[in-house]
Amino acid sequence: MKRSKIAVAVVVVVALFLMWITTGTQGKEVPFLSVTELQSGNYDQSRFRLGGNVKVGSILISKTDLLDMEFILQQGEATIKVHYNKTRPDLFEDDCEVIVEGEYRKNEFYADNLMTKCASRYEGDLRDENSYDLEKI
């Protein structure tokens, strides 16, 4: 009798653990779209991921809330206004390549995640006196 209670308890704990794992990993995928696709489509969800460059001269930072800003995301000729209200990455600047994730509402994008990619900051001669010659290793 005691063993059957322990066995039932173990089965219940394992079942709850498996349910917790499977329901926690079944989130809705956030699609990566172009600006043109986003502006021309009807979607059954509101969260999206976009990529492009920050249009030169388009960054506007609020004077009352320094975290609050907006900028124009540009992909070729297509553009969209992006609102962002969190700490900006150090590499965020004009013409920087960015990826934003957030919601599309009323023809504007409200990002809650902003990632930068400014490869030009890291380009240059990779060899220095402490570098290794991989062909000799």
Image (cartoon, helix red, strand yellow):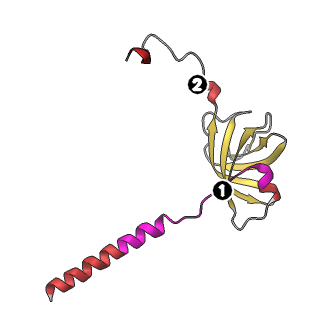
Q: Magenta segment range?
A: 16-37
**Dot 2 crowding, Cα within 10 Å, few <14, some 14–19, many 20+:** few
Q: Is residue 3 above or below residue 128?
A: below
Residue type, label 1: Pro
Q: State how far apart marks 1 and 2 are (Cα).
A: 29 Å
Q: Residue furthest front?
A: 135
* Residue 7 visible in image: yes
Residue corresponding to mark 1: 31
Q: Residue at x 50, y 14 (%)?
A: 127
Based on the displayed image, in which of its 4 quarters is residue 73 positioned? Answer: top right
Which residue is drawn at the image coordinates 22% and 80% (left, top)?
Answer: 7
- Residue placed at 47% from the left, 66% from the top? 24
Front-most of residues 104 and 28: 28
Residue topped by disc 2: 122
Task: Describe residue 91's horizontal placement relative to residue 20 as left or right.
Answer: right
Is 136 placed left or right of 38 in the picture? left
The residue furthest bottom is 1
Q: How many marks?
A: 2
Quarter-of-image position of residue 97: top right
Question: Viewer-nearest of labels 1 and 2?
Answer: 1
The x and y percentages for residue 3 are: 15, 83
Between discs 1 and 2, the one toward the N terminus: 1
Q: Is residue 132 visible?
A: no
Q: Position of residue 88 (x, y in %)?
A: 63, 41
Amino acid type, label 2: Tyr
